[in-house]
Each structure stands twice: as C-alpha cells, then as structure tokens.
Amino acid sequence: MSVDEVGTAATVRQRAGDEPVGAVAAAWTDYLAAARQLDGVRRAAATAAVEQARAVEAAREELAGVHARLALQQARLRELGVPLISLTPTPPELTEAARSMVGGPAAVLAALRVAGGWADAADATLAARGPLRPSAWPPRVRNLLVYGPLALLVPLVQLVVLLVAGTGAASVVALVVGVPIPAVAFAAGWVAVGRFFPARAGERLDRTPRLGALTCLVPAVAVAGGIMLALLAG
C-alpha cells in the first residue's frame, strides 16, 4: 500500500470515529507528511542512481572510442615523423584534465565528447593536408624524390649518346665518365635531402643512406652493363 493510500484509509477511519483526534491526529498527519517526503527522496535517489549508471556506461563507451581513435592518430603521426614527446601530455595538461573529471560521470562524459570533437578536427586536418606535403611523407618515400632524379640523370644521357653516336668513341667516353657518377649522385642527394627537408627542433634527419645508395647505383650499373654489351656486340 502506498503512502497516499495509507493516508486515505487513516482519514476514513478518523471520520468513522475509529481513531482519536487531537494530538494523536496531528502526530499521524506529521507522520504521513514525513513518509511522503521520504518516499520522494527515495524516488529521486533511485532516479539519480539510474541516470548516473547510464552516464558511467556512456562514458566508458565514449572512452573506448576516443582511445582507439587517438591510438590510430598517434601511429599515423609517428609515421609522418612527429616525435613521441610531442604526442605525450605535459604535467599541466594532465592537471587540467584531472580538474575536469571531479564533476562526476556527467562531467567526464562531456570532456570525452569534447575530446572526440578534437579528434574529428585532427582527422580532417590530416586528411586535407598530410598527403599533399612531401615533408610529411615517410622518409623513404620522401627521399626518393631527391635520389631518384639524380640517379637517372647521367644514365639517361649515356643512353642518348649511345643511340645518337652508336658504338663509337663517344659511347666509350660516356661509359667511362659515368663510372663515378653514382657516388656523385649519392653525395648530391645527401646534401639535397638536408636542404629540402630540414629536421625539426629536437629531431634527427633520416637521410635513408642505404636506400639512397641503391637508388643511385642500380640505374647506373644497369645502363653501363647495357652499353658494354652494345660495344662488345658492335
């Protein structure tokens, strides 16, 4: 029986003459008021507990989503050459984040949603600008833009001389001149990588020397071998 039903039954009994009046009736009225107030507090507490549980569950789901997105962004930024120290929160940032958590699950959920908005903005920035800047590419791909043209320049000249002059003295001279060219191309690429893609503060520039040496050597050896075979056949 609810509090209102108890109050109605008590009122009926008073009117029927079953209960005394006066002080006892006043005490009973106070009891009913306190019971109603207690019932309201209980219902409010139950509602608050349900809302808090929902907020905690939503915060957990939001945290899992934000954590996964930040992990992917961190891996992508590391591939683009961003140092790990730049991706680690500083002590003042951690302190400010801790302050935003003291308001309970609702405050935590709101902070996580704000972080999700920042993650959206970061994704948009990476999608719009990252792939268009060679300086943001991985070092191997970026450095090929420098080593590749330098490695192909002289071999192409040697091929043109062979096609124009045939297997004559000009082709022999071009072959001999091209022997030290891979080392020259590699040295020029080494310097050019530092000029075109300088390292950020606190970072060490990755010139990918093995990749550069192979890039400069393979075309020269292939073309030199082809010219030698042409000379021998001629």
Image (cartoon, rainbow, N blue to C red):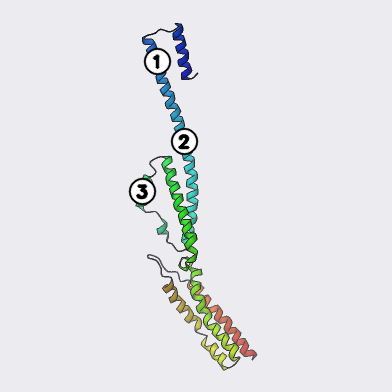
Q: Amino acid at mark 2?
A: Glu
Residue placed under numbered mark 2 in the picture: 51
Res 133 label: none
Q: Residue furthest top?
A: 17
Determine if residue 210 is in view.
no
Q: Percent x, y for residue 160?
A: 57, 86
Instruction: Decide: is 20 above or below 180.
Output: above
Residue placed under numbered mark 1 in the picture: 29
Residue placed under numbered mark 3 in the picture: 96
Left or right? Give the position of 90 relative to 170. Answer: left
Few, some or many C-alpha atoms within 10 Å of disc 3 (few <14, some 14-19, many ≥20)? few
Determine the secondary structure under disc 2.
helix
Q: Amino acid at mark 1?
A: Thr
- Residue in view at x 42 percent, y 17 percent: 32
The residue closer to the viewer here, 6 or 81, is 6
- Sequence-wise first label, 1 or 2: 1
Determine the secondary structure under disc 1.
helix
- Residue in view at x 41 percent, y 74 percent: 195
Q: Residue furthest right?
A: 233
- Sequence-wise first label, 2 or 3: 2
Instruction: Decide: is 50 above or below 1.
Output: below
Tag nearer the camera, 2 or 3: 2
- Residue in view at x 44 percent, y 24 percent: 39
Q: Residue furthest bottom?
A: 169
Instruction: Decide: is 83 above or below 156.
Output: above
Few, some or many C-alpha atoms within 10 Å of disc 2 (few <14, some 14-19, many ≥20)? some
Tag nearer the camera, 1 or 3: 1
Q: Amino acid at mark 3?
A: Glu
Q: CA gap, disc 2 to disc 3?
A: 26 Å
Q: Percent x, y for residue 110?
A: 43, 44
- Sequence-wise first label, 1 or 3: 1
